């Protein structure tokens, strides 16, 4: 299995909602990443987990809360988002110290 | 800090060869990646260079010069399906941080 899966594929939420994005991989990768990508822009790193511990937080607002419950799963909890948070949210995984990141298909988030 | 520059758009003809350049400035360089991204889809890995020189993989080749802070991606025998954005990304030492360039949108015409 060389795939990173993300659910849901699309999400529309209001500014008062609480929702979660999910990411899963079964490649044995111990590094997992969340990126945010706006239209026609490159992916921007948000968080990195290494061995299920948060190793990088790129000064992301607290309305985004990551969680890594085990080595295969990565969640991103969303609360009180703003319309400008609308974007494609990409999950990726890699071996620790390895070269290639495998990206999931992304969740397209719209905040109304 | 870090800075990655690549052309915004390029157009090439089916069957031709195209070279997409990338220049970077970063502290603690630990490798350069090229990813392909079709509109609305996730990036997919194309190549990785950490030492100077040319890496060839089928129709795609990638070159790196660390002293010049320069890389290029060479696409041969262009096909219509190669129309996509090509992202240059630099990895820094000491962690997992990979910084992406803004991407080059390649249009392949018949």
Image: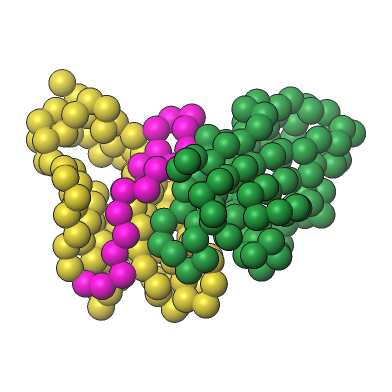
Chain colours: A green, B yellow
**Stretch in magenta:** B35-52
Residue at far right of view: A16
Q: Is residue B43 above or below residue A9?
A: below
Residue A30 appears left or right of A3? right
Asked which quadrant contains residue A90, the reply is top right
Residue A70 appears left or right of B40? right
x%, y% of residue A59? 71, 62
Residue A45 appears left or right of B100? right
Q: How many marks?
A: 0
Asked which quadrant contains residue B108, the reply is top left
x%, y% of residue A36? 60, 46
Asked which quadrant contains residue B62, the reply is bottom left
Residue at far top of view: B110
Query: In the rendered structure, does residue A11 fall within the stretch colored magenta?
Result: no
Give the residue drawn at x 47%, y 32%. B41
- Residue B107 visible? The answer is no
- Residue B50 visible? The answer is yes
Give the residue drawn at x 19%, y 50%. B57
């Amino acid at each position: 299995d060389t795939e990173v899966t993300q659910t849901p594929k699309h999400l529309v939420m209001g500014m008062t909602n609480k929702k979660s994005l999910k990411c899963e991989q079964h490649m044995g990768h111990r590094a997992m990443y969340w990126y945010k990508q706006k239209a026609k822009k490159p992916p921007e790193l948000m968080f990195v987990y290494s061995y299920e511990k948060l190793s990088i937080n790129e000064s992301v607002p607290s309305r985004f809360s990551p969680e890594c419950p085990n080595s295969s799963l990565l969640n991103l909890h969303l609360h009180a988002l703003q319309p400008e948070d609308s974007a494609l949210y990409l999950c990726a995984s890699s071996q620790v110290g390895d070269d290639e990141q495998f990206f999931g298909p992304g969740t397209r988030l719209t905040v109304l | 800090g870090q800075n990655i520059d690549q052309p915004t758009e390029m157009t090439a003809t089916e069957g031709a060869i195209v070279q997409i350049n990338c220049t970077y400035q970063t502290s603690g360089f630990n490798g350069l990646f090229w990813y392909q991204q079709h509109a609305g889809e996730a990036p997919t890995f194309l190549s990785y260079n950490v030492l100077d020189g040319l890496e060839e993989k089928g129709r795609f080749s990638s070159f790196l010069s660390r002293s010049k802070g320069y890389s290029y991606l060479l696409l041969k025998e262009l096909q219509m399906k190669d129309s996509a954005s090509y992202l240059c990304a630099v990895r820094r030492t000491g962690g997992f941080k990979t910084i992406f360039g803004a991407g080059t949108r390649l249009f392949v015409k018949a």
